[in-house]
């Protein structure tokens, strides 16, 4: 049914005249004029706003739960109590983006592992599963996904995002959000914006105080596109502001960011939420676009807001706007028109979600090196021995902070390998703290699989890119050194066993100084609660490793885009200059001619793929991909564009990802893949005109297996 504006006005008049809703709502709205579901959300919010007192409006702008962030069973990460007098229901907030954090939940693989899957459908199912558990914990809003770009892999929250590329991040985030929306939740995308570091030891370059100095082109082309896609394409109901400052103003009181760009240019109709403890000034926040402070409601406490209004630092119109946005979003997402979601862990389909966690881990596991030792041949290993080495194989590995999850159950890599090997293959385990003892254990086996894990966490950046940077062993190994040296263990095992395989469980890129001496190297990321099942299936070839790198692995830490310049990272006097511009991630390595250890998009398969017949017809590019091997496998064709530079001052990266597909092919099977380009794909942000422009010239159209493995090339003339 289609309603015209006149129809809406007529319905409104009927409601106001009768004092009753035109149609009874089956939820919590009560018997009020704004309860007619046929009315548009804006109008319903306006009707309700007229009846609220100023103190009631103010009460909607701050959270009411001080202990929720502890993640206790039966609680909520945050709560807005609503207004009982007018049947405004409470709003409950739950932490994602990797799983529910109230009590126990299904620990999904880290978002970086999902990104490595390069799979939109999988991202949608992931978002739906996370949102389902958040809903069944009694929440209305999910905090996630995290779409901050990996500017430096030293950042403590690298594991929580989708990697270094804005196109990949945006496409997968839109799918994630779509899945969560199907569960009926309000999605709060985070963290807006230029939030790319926690700080060294949480102090130097601290997320709480650093000022990101970023030119508008870099913002528009690198750091903002995923948020824009979340707003304009996915229709998120909430956007979370970050801790840091952006070009002088804190993000949660940034006029250009929240009012001019988000609500003005992008037309965002939802509400903005401050990250926990990210607010600074009541008047500035009220005037410059912050709608809700969830915890602790200090800056947006009723006394603080009343004082700001009395002093003229903000107006009642600001309060009305913020309250209207919150109410409008509640109406738009059905909170008034449905009963509350009851907390009920027993309704969670734990088995299905654990299976999905394993599937995500399989698709995200990235084979970086393989000289033929993988997949393992169980026939040749029958009667033999596999040595599993490294304490990371015997525990649940995840990132720290608000994305950490207490899992319902866990299948460790050791357990998964033991189950898959069966009774006819002996699996031994050694914790790997002492390199000599680890070598002895490896020497006795036919195959040695070494597991190594890093530690990433919110609140603090990594001290370096070594896999064990910052890790300490308790108790210390026999040698007495409490510092972990997993690289030494890997080197010892490689020297002791000619069939050495390394599995990394890391939140992002790490240095791999031994990569040329191992027979196989798998990046498993933080693989979630079903890690063991997934990794065993990949190791034994039950499934093709489906991952491709969403971040570049550097050969040296000095190759990072931010390396060697403290102004870039971690900043000087709390000012962090994004002077690398658009040359982030692989754009930097390509532009500077630096050979990475493993390039963006890289990932091997157990089969081989051939590419042919690249055709460019207007804004559509097509190519064919054939499985030329003898096993079923996943191909991930990637389309890059090399855009012409409009001037010597406006440099373009050699290539930029603008399309990708994930396809499963049987041996000998051929599939045609299509990439649809847009004008935006061909554009750059012009600082002079403050608009998107297309530079005339020849556009290189490149299709390949990674950013450094281009198989096909063509041109598009603009």
Image (cartoon, rainbow, N blue to C red):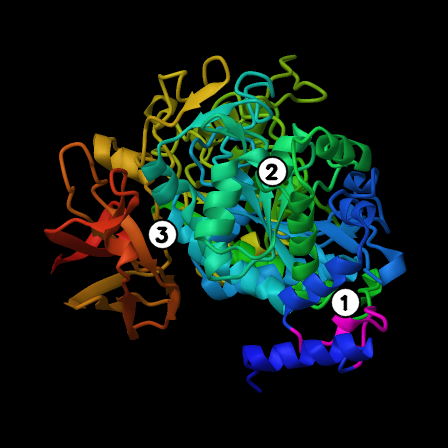
Question: Decide: marks 2, 3 in contact (CB < 8 A)?
Answer: no
State which quadrant residue 25 falls in. bottom right
Residue situated furthest bottom in the rendering? 1
| Residue drawn at the location 57% of the way across and 29% of the way down | 438
Pointer 1 residue: 336
| Residue drawn at the location 77% of the way across and 55% of the way down | 91
Q: Is residue 570 visible?
A: no
Q: Is residue 321 above or below residue 589?
A: below
The answer to whether residue 106 is left or right of residue 661 is right
How far is disc 3 from disc 1 in space, using C-alphas? 50 Å
**What is the magenta segment's predominant secondary structure?**
loop
The span picked out in magenta is 24-39
The answer to whether residue 396 is left or right of residue 523 is right
Q: Secondary structure under badge 2?
A: helix
* 330 or 547, nearer to the observer: 330
The answer to whether residue 615 is left or right of residue 153 is left
Q: Residues within 10 Å of mark 2 (few under 14, many from 20)?
A: many
Mark 2 or 1, which is nearer the eye?
Answer: 2
State which quadrant residue 291 falls in. top right
Residue 314 in the image: state x and y as whole percent: 65, 36
Q: Is residue 59 above or below residue 308?
A: below
How far is disc 2 from disc 1 in space, using C-alphas? 28 Å
Mark 2 or 3, which is nearer the eye?
Answer: 2
Q: Secondary structure under badge 3?
A: loop
Residue 364 in the image: state x and y as whole percent: 49, 53
Pointer 2 residue: 287
| Residue drawn at the location 61% of the way across and 25% of the way down | 433
- Quarter occupied by the N terminus: bottom right
Pointer 3 residue: 604
- Quarter occupied by the C terminus: bottom left
């Amino acid at each position: 049914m289609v309603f015209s504006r006149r129809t809406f006005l007529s319905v409104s008049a009927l409601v106001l005249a009768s004092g009753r809703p035109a149609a009874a709502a089956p939820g919590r709205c009560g018997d009020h004029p704004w309860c007619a579901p046929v009315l548009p959300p804006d109008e319903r919010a306006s009707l309700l706003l007229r009846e609220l007192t100023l103190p009631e409006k103010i009460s909607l702008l701050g959270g009411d739960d001080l202990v929720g962030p502890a993640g206790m069973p039966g609680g909520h990460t945050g709560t807005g109590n609503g207004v009982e007098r007018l049947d405004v229901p409470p709003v409950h907030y739950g932490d994602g983006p990797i799983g529910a954090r109230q009590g126990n939940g299904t620990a999904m693989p880290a978002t970086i592992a999902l990104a490595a899957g390069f799979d939109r459908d999988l991202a949608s199912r992931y978002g739906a599963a996370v949102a389902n558990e958040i809903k069944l914990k009694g929440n209305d809003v999910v905090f996630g996904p995290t779409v901050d770009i990996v500017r430096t892999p030293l950042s403590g929250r690298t594991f929580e995002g989708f990697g270094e590329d804005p196109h990949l991040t945006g496409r997968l985030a839109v799918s994630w959000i779509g899945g969560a929306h199907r569960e009926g939740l309000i999605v709060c995308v985070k963290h807006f914006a230029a939030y790319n570091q926690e700080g060294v030891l949480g102090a130097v370059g601290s997320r709480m105080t650093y000022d990101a100095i970023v030119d508008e082109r870099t913002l528009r082309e690198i750091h903002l596109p995923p948020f824009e896609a979340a707003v304009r394409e996915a229709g998120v109901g909430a956007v979370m502001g970050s801790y840091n400052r952006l070009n002088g103003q804190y993000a949660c009181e940034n006029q250009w960011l929240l009012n001019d760009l988000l609500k003005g240019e992008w037309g965002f109709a939802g509400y903005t939420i401050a990250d926990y403890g990210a607010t600074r000034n009541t008047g500035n926040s009220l005037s410059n676009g912050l709608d809700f402070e969830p915890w602790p409601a200090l800056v947006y406490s009723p006394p603080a807001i009343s004082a700001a209004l009395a002093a003229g630092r903000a107006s009642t119109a600001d309060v009305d706007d913020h309250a209207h946005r919150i109410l409008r979003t509640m109406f738009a997402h059905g909170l008034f028109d449905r009963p509350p979601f009851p907390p009920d862990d027993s309704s969670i389909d734990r088995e299905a979600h654990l299976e999905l966690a394993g599937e995500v881990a399989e698709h995200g596991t990235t084979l970086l090196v393989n000289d033929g030792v993988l997949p393992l041949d169980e026939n040749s290993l029958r009667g033999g021995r596999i040595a599993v080495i490294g304490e990371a194989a015997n525990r649940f590995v995840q990132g720290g902070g608000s994305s950490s999850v207490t899992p319902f159950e866990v299948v460790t890599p050791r357990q998964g390998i033991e189950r898959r090997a069966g009774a006819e293959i002996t699996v031994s385990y050694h914790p790997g703290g002492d390199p000599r003892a680890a070598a002895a254990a490896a020497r006795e086996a036919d195959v040695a699989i070494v597991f190594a894990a890093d530690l990433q966490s919110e609140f603090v950046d990594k001290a370096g890119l070594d896999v064990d940077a910052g890790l300490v062993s308790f108790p210390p190994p026999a040698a007495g050194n409490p510092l972990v040296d997993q690289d030494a263990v890997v080197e010892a095992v490689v020297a002791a066993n000619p069939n050495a395989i390394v599995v990394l469980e890391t939140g992002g890129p790490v240095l791999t100084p031994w990569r040329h001496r191992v027979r196989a190297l798998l990046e498993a990321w933080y693989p979630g609660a079903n890690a063991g099942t997934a990794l065993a299936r990949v190791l034994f070839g039950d499934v093709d490793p489906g991952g491709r790198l969403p971040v570049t692995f550097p050969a040296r830490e000095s190759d990072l885009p931010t390396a060697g310049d403290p102004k870039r990272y971690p900043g000087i006097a709390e000012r962090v200059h994004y002077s690398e511009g658009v040359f982030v991630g692989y754009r930097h390595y390509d532009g500077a001619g630096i050979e990475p250890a493993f390039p963006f998009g890289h990932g091997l398969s157990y089969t081989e793929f051939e590419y042919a017949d690249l055709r460019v017809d207007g804004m559509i590019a097509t190519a064919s991909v054939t499985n030329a091997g003898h096993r079923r496998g996943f191909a991930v064709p990637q389309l890059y564009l090399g855009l012409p530079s409009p001037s010597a001052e406006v440099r373009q990266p050699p290539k930029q990802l603008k399309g990708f597909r994930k396809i499963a092919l049987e041996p000998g099977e051929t599939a045609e893949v299509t990439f649809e380009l847009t004008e935006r794909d061909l554009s750059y942000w012009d600082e002079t005109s403050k608009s998107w422009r297309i530079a005339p010239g020849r556009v290189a159209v490149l299709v390949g297996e990674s950013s450094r493995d281009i198989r096909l090339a063509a041109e598009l003339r603009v």
